[in-house]
Image (cartoon, rainbow, N blue to C red):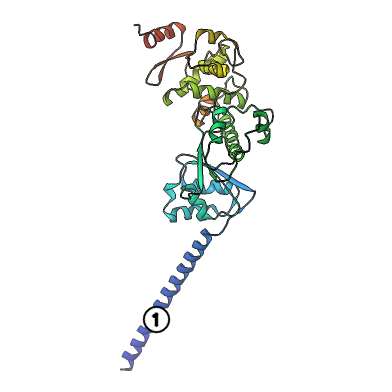
Amino acid sequence: MLGERAGRQGGFGLLRFVWGVALLALLAVALLFGGGWLWTQQPMSLSQETAEVSVEPGMTPRATAQAWVDAGVQTDPWLLYQWFRWSGQARQIKAGSYEIGHGVSPQRLLRIMVQGDESLSTVKLIEGWTFRKWRQVLSEAEGLRIETAAMSDAELMAALGSPDVAPEGQFFPDTYAYAKGSTDLAVMRRAHRAMKRQLEDAWAQRQPGLKLQTPQEALILASIIEKETGHEDDRGLVSSVFNNRLKIGMPLQTDPTVIYGLGDAFDGNLRKIDLQMDTPFNTYTRGGLPPTPIAMPGRASLMAAVQPEPSRALYFVASGGGRSAFSETLAEHNRAVNRYQRNRP
């Protein structure tokens, strides 16, 4: 009997011990969960006044978390990444350009990127737009305070820290999210910085042996490629034609530069007399690249400019459906023009 009583008491003691360990474990989990939840609501410190990140299409949540830390958010990138995962909204993060200031919590940061906060507005810069179009769109953007209306292009670029730089092509096409009350100059500054980063990255990956001498020349060529490419698959060959022409000193002879040089005088119909009218942007009458970009090129055109597809093509003509037919000789090109433009065999 004593043995049985002792066995029962031992069993009860073991049970109490197991329950005690389990309760401690649950308490630890609760504290960890509570602490983690509290962390998501606490403002994060920044190493500077603002932090900005461009979330590229296909960018992983882990890379996004690291990008924010690299941009100056003072937190552990692993913790930020785990919050994105745990929230269940990691896959809802949208590509675009984001900027935050002091006082933003991890919870608020995620909400910004999934655009769940109605106080945010967005403005989109489209590949191929001119700076004039970009200024017009910004002037009409909802909730954006306009500071640059009275500024000349030169004054605006000086305010952005790039004096003596023509504004055309200097802003990266992207979707820019901003809080209501932000200024157009702040959005322009972000787009200008983004283009600097994208151009620097593209230039670092340029092929050897290109005629292009500077990143600015690559930007100019990329803007021409942007305007001349009707189908994504042709972009590398369009670049090849222009790079090949630059190498042998052959005029680029590209209509979009002529149209840009005509400005308001262009009525939508490019005539032979227009091709003969000399302007700094007429690549029929002048050799080499024009003095500035003619539009805002996107990432694909920047990379195409510095990584042309290998070919000896010197000509191309629209062949329908947005595609182009490429030729190595003038005779081949003339046949392609007859076939696709003049409906001749």
Residue 119: % across, % down: 51, 49
Left or right: 289 as drawn, with respect to 33: right
Residue 154: % across, % down: 67, 29
Rate crowding at label 1 as few (under 14), some (14 to 19) or many (20 or more) other CA atoms within 10 Å: few
Residue at image position (37%, 9%) is: 339
Residue at image position (57%, 36%) is: 191
Observer-nearest residue: 267 or 193? Answer: 267
Left or right: 158 as drawn, with respect to 98: right
Vertical arrangement, residue 91 with respect to residue 196, above or below: below
Residue at image position (39%, 77%) is: 19
Residue at image position (55%, 33%) is: 172
Q: Mark 1 points at which residue?
A: 16
Observer-nearest residue: 239 or 107? Answer: 107
Quarter of the image for the C terminus: give it. top left
Occupied quadrant, residue 58:
top left
Q: Residue lying at the far bottom in this picture: please name it.
A: 1
Residue 148: % across, % down: 63, 35
Residue 259: % across, % down: 53, 17
Q: Which type of secondary structure does the marked residue at label 1 adopt?
A: helix
Amino acid type at mark 1: Arg
